[in-house]
Amino acid sequence: MDPNRSRALIALAVLFSINTVNFFDRQVLGAVTEPLRRDWGLTDTQLGGLGTAFVLLYAVAGLPFGRMADLWNRRFLLALGLLVWSALTSLSGISRGFWSLFALRMGVGIGEAACAPAATSLIGDLFRPHERGRALSVFMLGLPAGLALSYLISGALAQHFGWRTAFIAAGIPGFFLAGLILLIKEPQRGCAETTGVGAAHRPGSPYWIILSIPTMGWIIASGALHNFNMYAISYFLPAFLTRYHGMSIQNAGVIAGLLIGMVGALGTLLGGWIGDAAKLRRPNGRLLAACLAIAASVPLSLFALRQPPGAIAAFTLIQAAASLMMYIYYPIVYATIQDLLEPSLRGTGMAVYFLAMYALGAAFGPVATGWLSDHFAATAAWNTGIHQPVHGSMIEPFRALGLLRAMYVIPVLSAILAGVLFAGSKTVALDVGRLNAWLRNGRAE
């Protein structure tokens, strides 16, 4: 095998491992939602707020980290981020109340913001354009793998040893990976291109160049919608299985791990292969494939939520199909961003996309779903004749129904998302053509 090819594959394996730890640490909170809520007497809105604290700092910190990824050594940036978020994840296990955990989760968000811009920029220089969808799908396997492992391991640790142990254990692997990434050779920027453009980019502000590309606008909007849904699911799926379907915390973690891990991994891999194949057939094939997949998830999500309490097998089967379609989105859109931007702007482009995806989407997914859950639970209590402010143990019997009704927001937003992706498919060919013309001629068209 070509030594350069071998080095690229080894680097991809390390980046996949880092991304797995990234999402593992991020998801510990969702895996231990119920014991944490009961221990501290929190509402669903407060639980969602903990997720929002992480997401907002993650989104804002991503912008400077995106520029650093385009200007600094990306391996060092990744190692530094790993050390920060791993340490703060473990420290979350000794937090003494809501606000101390809130602050630590914000710090975890800052550390993890270094991961995606630096890692995807590295992949853009390690693999040629027609291979990037598949390479990014392997990297993005870390998302479902990390979430699944977190549900399985953190859920089991929380049930047997308490939720604090789950946080402490989650931070340990990152310290080893921080050393491992430093052994990878930093590739030259633009080395996978045939144009020799290197570190050059089109004239003007990097942010203006990115935001002036019509397809990037549609992709940014799609990211906000999709991450609202994915974070709502990841934070509240174990709680939904526990409350509505009567499962134990550990068994709910197993089902959530199956739906988000194994099925999500398959969807992510399929997305990479389908996206690359679709792009070979037509210039806008990637975004059309993502549009069709998200559209297919809408009726499946609705049908899954319509299953009665205790119908765990039916819910799992139908939701698995919906999750498969939803995970196809990630490698397709990430590869499209690489197609739309020159090598020296890819880290910044991912940071801009992540800012909108998290600040406008993921930041609201947990807290808005939690607020809707509390609202619908209170409404259900009122409708049964409890005509007074309801809280604590008074509202507990209605929390399952409240969360069920809140989760109907997911298929509604997915329907809108499919339309946004279709709009992006109408502009992507022209935008990629403009970039390729500039790359060939060395000047803006």
Image (spheres, rainbow, N blue to C red):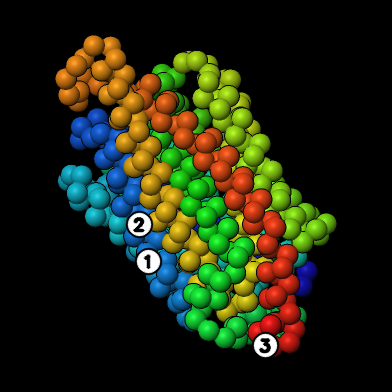
* Disc 2 crowd, CA 10 A, few/some/many (<14, 14-19, 20+): many
Residue that sits furthest to the top in the current view: 385
Q: Is mark 2 on a helix, strand or loop?
A: helix
Q: To which quarter of the image does residue 234 belong?
A: top left
Rendered residue at 41%/35% (across/down): 236
Task: For the N terminus, give its image quadrant.
Answer: bottom right
User: Hey, what amino acid is under mark 3?
Assistant: Arg
Q: What is the residue that sits farthest to the right in this orientation?
A: 281
- The label on residue 443 is 3
Q: Gap between marks 1 and 2, in whole Å?
A: 8 Å
Task: Work out whether mark 1 precedes mark 2 in sequence or the reverse, and give the earlier one.
Answer: 2
Question: Which residue type does callout 2 highlight?
Answer: Leu
* Mark 3 residue crowding within 10 angstroms, few (<14) / some (14–19) / many (20+): few
Q: In this view, does 47 lie to the left or right of 224?
A: left
Disc 2 + disc 3, Cβ < 8 Å: no
Q: Residue at image x 19%, y 25%? A: 391
Numbered mark located on residue 61 in the image = 1
What is the three-letter code of the residue carrying label 1?
A: Ala
Q: Do the residues labelled 1 and 2 touch (CB within 8 Å)?
A: no
Give percent across and percent down for residue 442.
69, 88
Mark 2 = which residue? 56
Q: Residue at x 59, y 83 (%)?
A: 201
Going by the image, does 249 lie left or right of 144? left
- Residue 292, horizontal then vertical, whole percent: 69, 43
Label 1 residue SS: helix
Q: How far apart are marks 2 and 3 (CA)?
A: 37 Å
Name which of mark 2 and mark 3 comes first in the sequence.
Answer: 2
**SS for callout 3:** loop
- Which quadrant holds the C terminus? bottom right
Query: Real-space Cα distance between discs 1 and 3?
Result: 31 Å
